[in-house]
């Protein structure tokens, strides 16, 4: 039996991993060269508690379940996860009333530990919050993680458990017949399959159309961000939310797992065809600053590292689309707007264990290994242990990225685990993520990628063909 998953974002990669628990051939396709380069690449990275979502929705159900699964998934896959807790801040009587609605929703959804705090209690815990805060909702189960690390680790673990990874391979056609899915066509070949999971992120509507299965239109809803460097670490320690609007959770201030501080996102609905419009705008970034300043007036803007934007796949109807489609053997895991990252482990568990395994009569195999050790980091070792490592392998002593102290040994290990592009190395090791944003290390990483992959310097890309970095040599 052969099952294909289309999309190696956080959702598809976790689904592929879950499928490898069974005695079945698993194929994971993505048109990008690495996992996690779609919606998963640019978001707030919050593991939400589940009080923002209306009771009875799939969003609410999978968010609360996913939040509970995160510590185990993070531990198994070596992905950072910290339960930093979150405050929803109210600055007016109307906003205080909104907190009450959130608590009711949260309690109906089964969110544990929700409590009200006075303005003074908030300021005692987060002194940089706007002193006009009147009251807050405290949610201790809110956490932060690294979405792309999760997608990469899940794909790597799926491969270690037997999944075949097909990167830079776009699914262009889905053959159906006798009311069921039969085969996938990509530029590299035709794959006969027994089942297909559509986890194509912003493109889940188009992939569904390839199979002739109904799916709600997906509207790209852009979110722009400003990221402050880790020199601002500790500026706030928890996730700070405003009271939400009907459209989004609002503009937030939060810590990242790498020590940075993230401000954003905006919520801008774009025309359906603008699925790649990840540019930032002056208006959007001004909105980010205004929204963030409302929560924390004195932002350390001297520490701004970069701005970026992501696109939410906003389904008409507003809820996730998870489960069987009208076509036999064709399953959806789409419309994964926020809190899709949080929900991903629960969606994978539900779709595979409760739907696909019973539909297709899959049997569990004995040898599944859920563990994927993280790539070791220099700071994990004492000076003595590091010296010993250098003694054994001098590449541990060659620093490639000084900002984040990444060594050649880690870059090589990232490549051994599947990194094929500059982004792949960056997202796996943190090289190029620091203060200089790759000004120093890019050339060195290009050299190592070319050497390890046996390609030329000019062939190395930022994120797949068309994004080559070096145009040619000045001297032969
Ligand atoms: C601004 C913003 C903020 C957010 N904040 C949060 C948050 O804080 N917490 C939270 O829980 N969620 C958040 N989310 C939502 C979360 O990021 C998404 O739900 C999640 O990343 C979706 O993952 P995915 O795997 O479904 O999609 P993707 O990561 O987009 O993966 C889909 C993959 O499918 C591939 N693909 C598409 N078509 C094809 C094809 N034909 N053939 C082969 N491959 C194909 C794409 O290349 C892509 O890699 C946020 C989203 C945004 C944009």
Image (cartoon, rainbow, N blue to C red):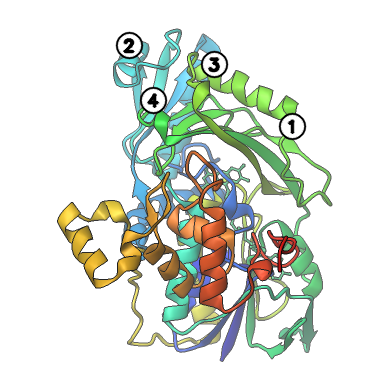
Tell me which numbered mark, 4 or 1, is placed earlier along the sequence: 4
Mark 4 near mark 1, Cβ–Cβ under 8 Å? no
Residue extending farthest front: 475
In the image, which disc is placed on residue 294? Answer: 3
Q: Is residue 266 left or right of residue 143?
A: right
In the image, which disc is placed on residue 235? Answer: 4
Task: Provide residue 465's location: percent of width, then percent of height.
Answer: 72, 67
Residue at point 39%, 17% (across, down):
128
Tell me which numbered mark, 2 or 3, is placed earlier along the sequence: 2
Residue extending farthest left: 384
Q: Is residue 120 left or right of residue 287?
A: left
Instruction: Tell me: residue 74, above or below residue 394.
Output: above
In the image, which disc is placed on residue 120? Answer: 2
Q: CA distance from mark 1 to mark 2?
A: 36 Å
Tell me which numbered mark, 3 or 1, is placed earlier along the sequence: 1
Q: CA distance from mark 3 to mark 1?
A: 20 Å
Question: Marks 4 and 2: which is nearer the front?
Answer: 4
Q: Nearer the viewer, residue 139 or 452?
A: 452
């Amino acid at each position: 039996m052969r099952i294909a998953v289309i999309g190696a974002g956080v959702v598809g990669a976790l689904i592929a991993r879950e499928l490898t628990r069974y005695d079945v051939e698993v194929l994971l396709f993505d048109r990008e060269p690495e996992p996690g380069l779609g919606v998963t690449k640019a978001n707030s990275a919050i593991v939400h508690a589940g009080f923002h979502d209306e009771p009875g929705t799939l969003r609410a159900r999978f968010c609360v379940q996913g939040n509970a699964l995160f510590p185990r998934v993070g531990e198994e896959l070596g992905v950072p996860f910290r339960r930093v807790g979150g405050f929803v801040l109210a600055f007016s009587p109307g906003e205080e009333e909104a907190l009450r609605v959130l608590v009711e929703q949260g309690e109906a959804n089964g969110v544990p530990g929700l409590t009200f705090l006075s303005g003074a209690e908030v300021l005692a815990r987060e002194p940089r919050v706007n002193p006009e805060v009147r009251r807050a909702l405290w949610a201790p189960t809110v956490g932060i993680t690294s979405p792309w690390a999760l997608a990469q680790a899940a794909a790597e673990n799926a491969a270690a458990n037997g999944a075949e990874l097909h990167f830079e391979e776009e699914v262009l056609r889905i053959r159906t017949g006798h009311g069921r899915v039969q085969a996938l066509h990509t530029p590299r070949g035709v794959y006969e399959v027994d089942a297909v999971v559509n986890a194509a992120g912003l493109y889940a509507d188009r992939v569904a159309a390839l199979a002739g299965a109904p799916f709600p239109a997906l509207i790209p809803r852009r979110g722009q961000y400003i990221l402050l460097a880790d020199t601002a670490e500790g500026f706030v320690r928890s996730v700070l939310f405003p009271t939400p609007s009907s459209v989004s959770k609002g503009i937030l201030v939060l810590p990242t797992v790498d020590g940075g501080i993230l401000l954003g996102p905006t919520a801008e609905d774009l025309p359906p065809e603008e699925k790649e419009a990840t540019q930032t705008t002056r208006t959007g970034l001004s909105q980010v600053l205004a929204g963030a300043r409302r929560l924390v007036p004195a932002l350390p803007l001297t520490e701004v590292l970069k701005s970026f934007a992501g696109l939410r796949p906003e389904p008409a109807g507003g809820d996730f689309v998870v489960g069987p489609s009208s076509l036999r053997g064709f399953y959806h895991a789409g419309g994964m707007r926020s809190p899709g990252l949080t929900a991903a482990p629960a969606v994978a568990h539900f779709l595979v264990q409760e739907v696909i395994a019973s539909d297709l009569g899959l049997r569990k195999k004995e040898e599944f290994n859920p563990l994927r050790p993280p790539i070791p980091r220099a700071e994990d070792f004492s000076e003595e242990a590091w010296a010993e490592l250098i003694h054994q392998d001098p590449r541990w002593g060659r620093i490639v990225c000084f900002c984040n102290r990444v060594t050649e040994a880690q870059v090589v290990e990232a490549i051994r685990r599947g990194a094929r592009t500059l982004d792949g190395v960056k997202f796996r090791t943190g090289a190029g993520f620091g203060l200089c944003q790759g000004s120093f290390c890019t050339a060195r990483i290009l050299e190592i990628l070319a050497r390890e992959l046996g390609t030329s310097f000019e062939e190395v890309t930022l994120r797949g063909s068309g994004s080559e970095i070096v145009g040619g040599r000045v001297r032969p």
